[in-house]
Image (cartoon, grey):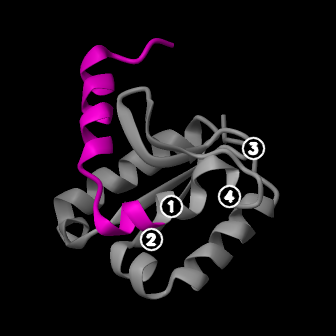
Amino acid sequence: MAVPSDVLDNARTLRTRQTDAENLLWLLLRNRRFCGFKFRRQHPVGRFILDFYCHEVLLAIELDGSSHTDSAQKAYDDERTRVLEGAGIRVIRFWNDDVLKNTESVLEALHAACYSPHPCPSP
């Protein structure tokens, strides 16, 4: 399925405007630095742009800041997760502060997600 050009343009823009947490996590994930898995940043999937994505294990990593405490944003995030999981992509979320202050714990959770069995999407 082709990705709409506006989504591709937005993904390119987001790559140049990463948060401190995204920069740190990208430093740890890029070039197969994390357990040999290849991650992509600001990766388009359909109408969504995933902060980080590993196709090998069908894992999306989303980093959330304070705007994600808003009820409308939470509802959007929940719907987005349902759609992605329906497509067979597991979604794991971390707060920006956790990436910056509890990096080891985030990496441990990522390790567990990468090596745990992936449930089949529901029909």
Local packing at callout 3 (Cα closer than 10 Å; few below 14, some 14-19, many 20+) is few
Question: Type of residue at label 4?
Answer: Arg
- Point out the tag, 3 or 4, that comes first from the N-terminus: 4
What residue do we see at 31% from left, 32% from top? 12
The overriding secondary structure of the stretch rendered in magenta is helix
Query: Marks 1 and 3, how far apart in space?
Result: 30 Å
Q: Look at discs 2 and 3 and give the one toward the viewer.
A: 2
**Residue 20, image x and y in percent?**
31, 68
Residue bearing the label numbered 1: 27
Question: Type of residue at label 2?
Answer: Phe
Query: Marks 4 and 1, how far apart in space?
Result: 8 Å
The reply to whether the magenta stretch includes residue 22 is yes
Q: Look at discs 3 and 4 and give the one toward the viewer.
A: 4
Q: Look at discs 4 and 2 and give the one toward the viewer.
A: 4
Q: Secondary structure at mark 2?
A: strand
**Residue 57, image x and y in percent?**
72, 46
The reply to whether the magenta stretch includes residue 121 is no
Q: Secondary structure at mark 3?
A: loop
Query: Marks 3 and 4, how far apart in space?
Result: 27 Å
Residues drawn in magenta: 1-24
- Point out the tag, 2 or 3, that comes first from the N-terminus: 2
What residue do we see at 68% from left, 58% from top? 33
29 relative to 20 in the view: left or right: right
Residue bearing the label numbered 2: 94
What residue do we see at 42% from left, 81% from top? 98
Question: Type of residue at label 1?
Answer: Leu
